[in-house]
Amino acid sequence: MRRARDIIGLPIICVRSGKQAGTVKDLLLGSDWQAEALLLETKHWFSEVTCIEWNDILALGEDAVTIETEEVIRPLESCAFEGKAR
């Protein structure tokens, strides 16, 4: 089991392009205290908040989080996870 503080700050790498797609800012937890999504750092003051749903993560390593494509990065409002306020 990984601690949240070990995941926050990790780069998010897109496997298909090999580029860094962002940085983990925080974890979003469901009602059962399980991680359901990663919140990404915003690049600008008025940027849209984005997240990656937990099932879209390919691997969570010591040095990075990997995803298949940047298409799995979605606005927070469109992420469908259990802990989301409705």
Image (tube, grey):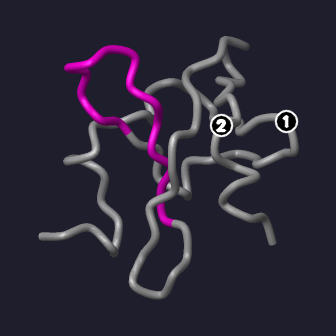
Badge 2 amino acid? Gly
CA distance separating discs 2 and 1: 10 Å
**SS for callout 2:** loop
Q: For mark 1, does the 10 Å Cα neighbourhood hold few (<14), some (14 to 19), or many (20 or more) residues?
A: few
- Residue 77 placement (x, y as % from top left): 20, 48
Q: Nearer the viewer, residue 26 or 32?
A: 26
The numbered mark at residue 9 is: 2
Q: Answer above or below: position of 42 versus 36.
A: above
Residue 22: give its label.
none
Position of residue 84 in the picture relative to residue 34 (left or right): left
Q: Residues within 10 Å of mark 2 (few under 14, many from 20)?
A: some
In the rendered image, the vertical position of residue 81 relative to residue 51, given as above or below: below
- Relative to 55, say whether 64 is above or below: above
**Residue at the spot of label 1:** 63
Answer with mark 2 or mark 1, whichever residue precedes in sequence.
2
Q: Which residues are magenta?
A: 36-50
Residue sitting at 63 percent across and 32 percent down? 68
Quarter of the image where the C terminus is located:
bottom left
Considering only vertical position in the picture, is 8 above or below 70?
A: below
Please tell me which residue is depicted at 55% across the width and 77% down the height of the picture. Answer: 34
Secondary structure character of the magenta stretch overall: loop
Q: What's the residue at 67%, 12% (across, down)?
A: 19
Q: Amino acid at mark 1?
A: Asp
In this rendering, which labeled residue sits more in front, label 2 or label 1? Answer: 2
Which residue sits furthest bottom?
Answer: 32
The stretch drawn in magenta includes residue 43? yes
Residue that sits furthest to the left in the current view: 86
Q: In the figure, residue 30 lies in which quadrant?
A: bottom left
Q: Is residue 26 left or right of residue 76?
A: right
